[in-house]
Image (cartoon, rainbow, N blue to C red):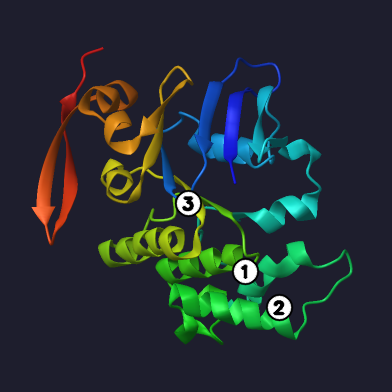
Amino acid sequence: MVFEVKNGSFGYPRSQNILKHITFSMDQPEVLSVLGANGAGKTTLLKCMLGLLPWREGGTYLDGRDIKDIPYHQFWQKVGYVPQAKASVFSCNTEDMVLLGRNAHLGTFGQPGKRDREIAEECMEEIGIAHLKGRACSQISGGELQMVLIARALAARPSVLVLDEPESNLDFRNQLIVLRAIERLCREKGIYAVVNTHYPEHALSISQKALLLTEEGEAVFGAADEVLSEANLDRAFGVEVKLYPLQLKNRTFTCVLPVGLKEA
C-alpha cells in the first residue's frame, strides 16, 4: 500500500496559503512524524490529508487513488484518526467509546453485533487497557483516555493511523506508554502511522521518516535523522538547537537541547 500527499496546498477562504506544495509518501509500515512551530499548520495538515479540510491544490492518495474518489466508509475502514485528547465529557463507558470505531463497517442504520464487540475488546487488549473496561470516559485520566481513543481508531482495523499530538499533556510514564504502543502497532500489525508531535526527541526515537513544516508553510521531508538536523530545527523553530546522542540499553537516543533564541 502507498499513502501519499502530492503538491498539497491549503488556505482558508480569502486568505493566502498556509500550507504550500506539501509532498510526502509512505510505502511500508513505519512512523512518519510531523513537526513545526506553533501556528505552522500541523493539525491543519492532518485534516487536509484526511479530507476533513479540502486541499486548495494537490491531493491525498491511497494506492494512487485520490481519496475524494474513495467512498466514505471504504476510506475510514483503511484510515484511523486519533484527535487530540481533551478531558472527556462523555458519560459512556470505555467499551462503548472503542466500539464507535466499528461505525465504518456498519451500514447507515446498522447496529454493532457480537463480532464488533469482540473486536473492540481485542483492541483494548492489544493496547493494554483491558483493565479500563466498565469505566466511564469522564472518570479516567488523560493518558488513559488517549489510549482509549487509539483503541477506538484501531477498532476499524485500519492500515493507516493518524494521530494528532498523542503524547501532549501526558506525564513521562504515559508518554512512553503511548509512544511504545505506536511503535508496536507499526512493527507487529503492519500499520502506517502519521504522528503530529511537539517533541523532536520523540520523533527521533520512534520515526523512520519526518516532515518538518517551516514558517513559510513549506515542508522538509525525508529520513527522520536527516530532516531533524540542528540546522533544520534552527530554521523551523527560530532557536539555536544542539543534538546529543545517548547510547543506553543497546539503543541510541537523541537529546534535543534548545540553547538560545535566534536573532531576528
Determine the residue positioned at 67% across, 28% down. 55
Residue 45 placement (x, y as % from top left): 55, 34
- What kind of residue is marked 1? Ala
Q: Amino acid at mark 3?
A: Pro
Classify residue 6 by image quadrant. Answer: top right
Q: Is residue 260 left or right of residue 70?
A: left
Name the foreground residue: 171 vs 230.
230
Q: CA distance from mark 3 to mark 1?
A: 18 Å
Residue 136 is situated, as x and y percent measured from the top left of the image, at: 56, 80
Residue 155: assigned label: 1
Amino acid bearing label 2 = Asp
What secondary structure is marked by label 1?
loop
- Residue that extends furthest to the right in the rendered view of this protein: 109
Label of residue 29 in the image: 3
- Would residue 15 be found to the left or right of residue 67 on screen? left
Task: Return the residue nearer the eye: 12 or 117.
Answer: 117
Q: Is residue 93 above or below residue 18?
A: below
Q: Residues within 10 Å of mark 3 (few under 14, many from 20)?
A: many
**Residues at badges 2 and 1 in contact (C-beta under 8 Å)?**
yes
Distance CA(mark 2)–CA(mark 3): 25 Å
